[in-house]
Image (cartoon, grey):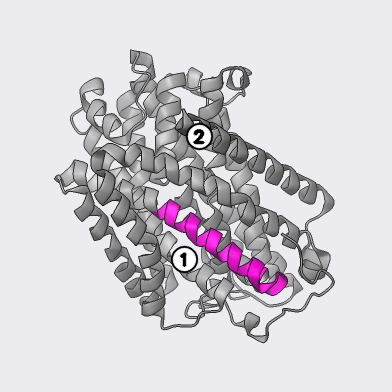
Amino acid sequence: MLNSDANSTKPRRSDSDIPSLPESYRTIPVPKHFSFWRKLLAFSGPGYLVAVGYMDPGNWATDLAGGSAYGYTLMSVIMISSLMAILLQILAARLGIATGRDLAQACRAEYSRPVSFSLWVLCEIAICACDLAEVIGSAVALNLLFKIPLIIGVILTTLDVLVVMLLQKRGFRYLEALVIGLIALIGMGFLLELFFSQPNVAEVFKGLIPSSQIISNPGMLFIAIGIIGATVMPHNLYLHSSIIQTRKYEQNTEGKREAIRFAAIDTTTALTLAFFINAAILIVSAATFYTRGQHDVAEIQDAYKLLSPTLGVGVASTVFALALLASGQNSTLTGTLAGQIVMEGFLNLRLRPWLRRLITRGIAIVPAIIVTALYGNSGVAKLLIFSQVILSVQLSFAVVPLVLFTSDKKRMGEFVNPPWLKCLAWFVAVVIAVLNATLLYYTVRDWIK
């Protein structure tokens, strides 16, 4: 991936300055006279829209498998992956604030048309893969709760595009409120599950300390790579760099610096909450299944069926399924937005908002309908794993440009990454690339066998 004009800091196309998400661009005011807490409230929101990608159904499978097979040991892996995610999402917000462009627009302005188009195709594939996991998760939840067939459940999830259209028409804050409300529902659901499962608190804290077993045990290492490799969603980097620009902060050095500071607080808070929810899934799995010798619970349907009888609490499985439904639907909402952002950013395709969202939703939902119709209940777990592998392959194509752009002084000016942050960002990018390559190798090897 070569810079086609490394010495140029100007966009190659005159249309590249059209704002990202124009219907929502700078629509949320941040008055200069606001107090710290009111400004923090005004900036809070984008981090939570991003956070839903870190608690989507695709992550549930690895957390359930890790907890049932190895107890609390992989808690440290969830913590480390969350810290890496926080760093990269802060960089994405930093890019959007400092340059006024989202990541897709920055790629289109910097790279040649064939490279930019290739990056768009890869990103769309990643969004389809991610949406596959989210849609299937929602469909599974509807099937578990209401016995709705999977294929009907998948089709029902397409209604989220109407929700996005309605809420964005009323204001971006309404969409953020819905997402935060669903996150709260997921969080409350797992607080109840933690109460039902009564985990060993001392063992939980012990699990936060990295263990050499994670490296020496091949099975544990594979699941750990899956957790880290699929943690950062590629489309979340594009999404965050765009939606941070919905805030109407001062377009000067002081205003941008303040926006970056509040965006970092918002991101850290939201992704810390996502860490606790992911950790809760693993903890519940460990406390419920691992401690009772059930070490092979890796599928969502199995966890649902076993929770209530194992814990002796009738509503445990229902609470689990409700949280799954909230997680899947939340993620499809933000996935629809991400699809719109990458299509606009890479292709500069300007259509009416309702048509644009319908197209991006269709690109993502059609593969989900096809594979669900072909594989049904028996193939759901394999499809979830397959979606994570596709995400892992695409991730570096988003992370590397992000680190390159935010480390470029000509592009970022005084907001360029300082040397320590630049080194840390490249270290994380290399670690993610190596782990994702390893995950891909193991997965392909297992398929061949």
165 vs 73: above or below: below
58 vs 408: above or below: above
Q: Is residue 204 left or right of residue 183?
A: right
Q: Is residue 446 left or right of residue 145?
A: right
Q: Pointer 1 and pointer 2: residues touching (CB < 8 Å)?
A: no
Stretch of the chain drawn in magenta: 107-131
Q: Which residue is mark 1?
A: 339
The answer to which quarter of the image holds residue 198 is top left
Q: Is residue 384 left or right of residue 212?
A: left
266 vs 174: above or below: above
The answer to which quarter of the image holds residue 345 is bottom right
Marks 1 and 2 sit apart, C-alpha to C-alpha, by 27 Å
- Magenta stretch secondary structure, dominant: helix
The amino acid type found where label 2 is placed reads Thr
The answer to which of 293 and 44 lies nearer the viewer is 293
Q: Position of residue 388 (x, y in %)?
A: 47, 44
The mark found on residue 86 in the picture is none
Residue at left offset 53%, top offset 58%: 235
Q: Quadrant of the N terminus?
A: bottom right
Q: Which residue is mark 2?
A: 443
**Mark 1 or mark 2, which is nearer to you?**
2
- What is the residue that sits farthest to the left in this orientation? 147
The answer to which of 216 and 446 lies nearer the viewer is 446
Residue at left offset 31%, top offset 44%: 323
The answer to which of 46 and 386 lies nearer the viewer is 386
Comes first in the chain, label 1 or label 2: 1
Q: Position of residue 200 (x, y in %)?
A: 43, 18
Disc 2 element:
helix
The amino acid type found where label 1 is placed reads Gly
290 vs 443: above or below: above
Residue 258 magenta-drawn?
A: no
The answer to which of 153 and 293 lies nearer the viewer is 153
